[in-house]
Amino acid sequence: MRVDVVTLFPEEFGKTLGYGVVGRAIDRRVLELRCWNPRDFASDERGTVDDRPFGGGPGMVLATEPLRQCLAAIRSDGGTATTALLAPDGKRFDQEAARIMSQRDRLVLVCGRYEGIDERLVAAEMDEAWSVGDYVLSGGELPAAIVVDAVARLLPGVLGKAASAVEDSFFDGLLDCPHYTRPEHGDFGDVPPVLLSGHHEQVRRWRLKQSLGRTWQRRPDLLRRRRMSKEERELLAQFIEEYMAGQTGRADEEAR
C-alpha cells in the first residue's frame, strides 16, 4: 500500500512513524510512505501557501493553487488514489474506516492547517474528510499519523501475528478485554484463574464477558448500536450482576 501525505511539516512524519509497527511495515515494503510539501509548489520565492479569508476574521486560509499543483503532481506519480482531508469537520475516523482504508492500494492524506482550506478546493479535489475526535488541533499532521498507524497494523504481514489485529479494541465493535502476564501472583493481585486453566472455551467466554463489561462501563454508546447475540446478552448480564455485587460489598465494608 502507498500513502502520500500532503503536509507543511513533512519532518514530523519521519519522527512519528519511523518506529514500531509502521516503521516495520515500511522496512518490509508492505507500506510506502511519501510526504509532499505544498510550499514546493508555491509561485513565489517565499513559498507562500496561505492568504487572508474573504469576509474578514482572524487567521489565514490555505490557498488553492499550491495545493492543487501538489495534488496534481501526486496523481501524476502513480495514478489514481482516494484523497482524504484531515479536518475537525470530517466524519469520525474509527476502526471500520481503518479497515476499509487498509484494503485500498493507495491513499492521499491532506493535512489541514490554519483556519482550513479554500472550500472550492475541498469540493473539487477531496473524496472524503476525516476527524479523529471532537477537538481542534494545530493541524492535520497528528491525525494523519493516527490514520497511517491504524491502517498499517491491518496490512498483511505487518504484525507478528495476524490475530493481534483481530483481538484489538474496536475490531468487532467492543473494547478489548484485560490482559495479564508474569508473575502469576504479585503485589497488585493475582492473575484470574481462568486464564491459567488451559480451557480454551472458558477463556474465550471470560474474555468476551470482560470486553462486553468494559464497553458497558466505558463506552456504552457502542453497545447501544450493537446487535448482541444471546450469548453476549447473557455474559453482559453476568458481568453487571457481579460488578454491582462487588460495589455493594465495598460499600458495606466502608460503612463498617
Image (cartoon, rainbow, N blue to C red):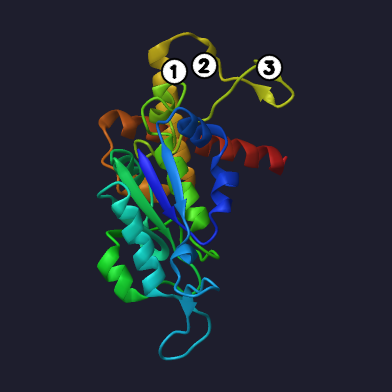
Q: How many marks?
A: 3
**Classed neighbour count for the residue bearing mark 1: other residues with Cα under 10 Å, few (<14), some (14–19), many (≥20):** some
| Left or right of residue 22, residue 256 in this image | right
User: What is the secondary structure assignment of the residue under circle 3?
Assistant: strand
What x and y, as percent, mark residue 119?
33, 75
Indicate the amino acid at tag 2. Leu
Label 2 to label 3, Cα distance in Å?
13 Å
User: What is the secondary structure assignment of the residue under circle 2?
Assistant: helix
User: What is the secondary structure assignment of the residue under circle 1?
Assistant: helix
In the current view of this chain or complex, which residue is farthest to the front? 45
In the current view of this chain or complex, which residue is farthest to the top? 198
The relative height of residue 129 versus residue 203 in the rendered view (above or below) is: below
The residue identified by callout 3 is 185
What x and y, as percent, mark residue 5?
43, 52
**Classed neighbour count for the residue bearing mark 2: other residues with Cα under 10 Å, few (<14), some (14–19), many (≥20):** some
Identify the mark nearer the N-term, 1 or 2: 2
